[in-house]
């Protein structure tokens, strides 16, 4: 499979999330045999007020619905940032065969950085994990988003501090 091609699609999803004020993480699930994109999604936690609305969970749900099955064997998941423990559990439970991600999440990584859920041989399913695909671009999308958010928050605090008290 052309990992960079699918990661670029996941990055497009991440940018959609950023435009909504969501943490910019995007995911794409593709059939490993045909190369067909089955589902694509981005984070929607803030918009949907749903703690589970991570890009990976949404894309897994959409793929299961589209395929009419919960076993996603034969599929590869492309995600811009290392999946968290919740998403890693969903990947294992959904029987995804391959996970490709861009940049590590050193604070909440469930694939390699903190936990090794996806490749844990004690679980009922293991997937292949590939990291570092379009790593710099994926990391830059996150850096830009949080830099913008810090600037907005700073401007908001400054504005509130200068507002007349009633």
Image: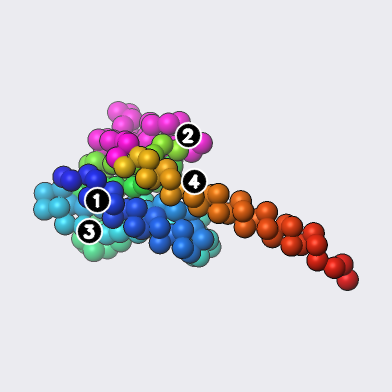
Q: Is residue 120 above or below residue 152?
A: above
Question: In the rendered image, which residue does mark 1 sit on?
Answer: 6
Question: In the rendered image, which residue does mark 3 sit on?
Answer: 38
Q: Earlier in the sequence, mark 3 or mark 2?
A: 3
Asked if labels 1 and 2 touch by Cβ distance under 8 angstroms, the answer is: no
x 27%, y 63%: residue? 65
Q: Earlier in the sequence, mark 4 or mark 3?
A: 3
Residue 122: x and y, percent? Answer: 32, 29
Disc 1 from disc 4: Cα separation:
21 Å
Which corner quadrant holds the N terminus? top left
Disc 2 from disc 1: Cα separation:
23 Å
Q: Residues within 10 Å of mark 1 (few under 14, many from 20)?
A: many
Q: Of 48 and 68, which appears nearest the observer?
A: 48
Asked if labels 4 and 1 touch by Cβ distance under 8 angstroms, the answer is: no
Disc 3 from disc 2: Cα separation:
29 Å
Question: In the rendered image, which residue does mark 4 sit on?
Answer: 143
Helix, strand or loop status at disc 1: helix
Residue 25: x and y, percent? Answer: 41, 51
Q: Residues within 10 Å of mark 4 (few under 14, many from 20)?
A: few
**Residue 89 image-quadrant placement:** top left
Q: Is residue 149 above or below residue 96?
A: below
Q: Earlier in the sequence, mark 1 or mark 4?
A: 1
The mark lying in front, picked from 3 and 2, is 2
39 sits left or right of 48 in the view: left
Disc 1 from disc 3: Cα separation:
11 Å
Whether residue 13 is visible, yes or no, is yes
Q: Earlier in the sequence, mark 1 or mark 3?
A: 1
Disc 4 from disc 3: Cα separation:
29 Å
């Amino acid at each position: 499979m052309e990992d960079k091609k699918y990661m670029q699609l996941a990055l497009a999803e991440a940018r959609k999330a950023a435009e909504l004020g969501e943490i910019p993480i995007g995911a794409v699930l593709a059939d490993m045999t045909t190369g067909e994109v089955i589902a694509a999604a981005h984070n929607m936690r803030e918009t949907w007020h749903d703690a589970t609305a991570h890009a990976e969970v949404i894309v897994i749900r959409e793929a299961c619905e589209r395929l009419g099955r919960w076993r996603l064997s034969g599929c590869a998941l492309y995600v811009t940032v290392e999946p968290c423990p919740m998403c890693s559990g969903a990947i294992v439970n959904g029987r995804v065969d391959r996970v490709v991600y861009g940049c590590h999440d050193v604070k909440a990584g469930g694939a390699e950085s903190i936990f090794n859920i996806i490749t844990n041989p004690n679980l009922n399913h293991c997937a292949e994990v590939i990291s570092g695909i379009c790593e710099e671009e994926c990391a830059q999308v996150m850096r830009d988003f949080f830099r913008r958010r810090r600037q907005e928050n700073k401007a908001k605090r400054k504005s509130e501090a200068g507002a007349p008290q009633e």
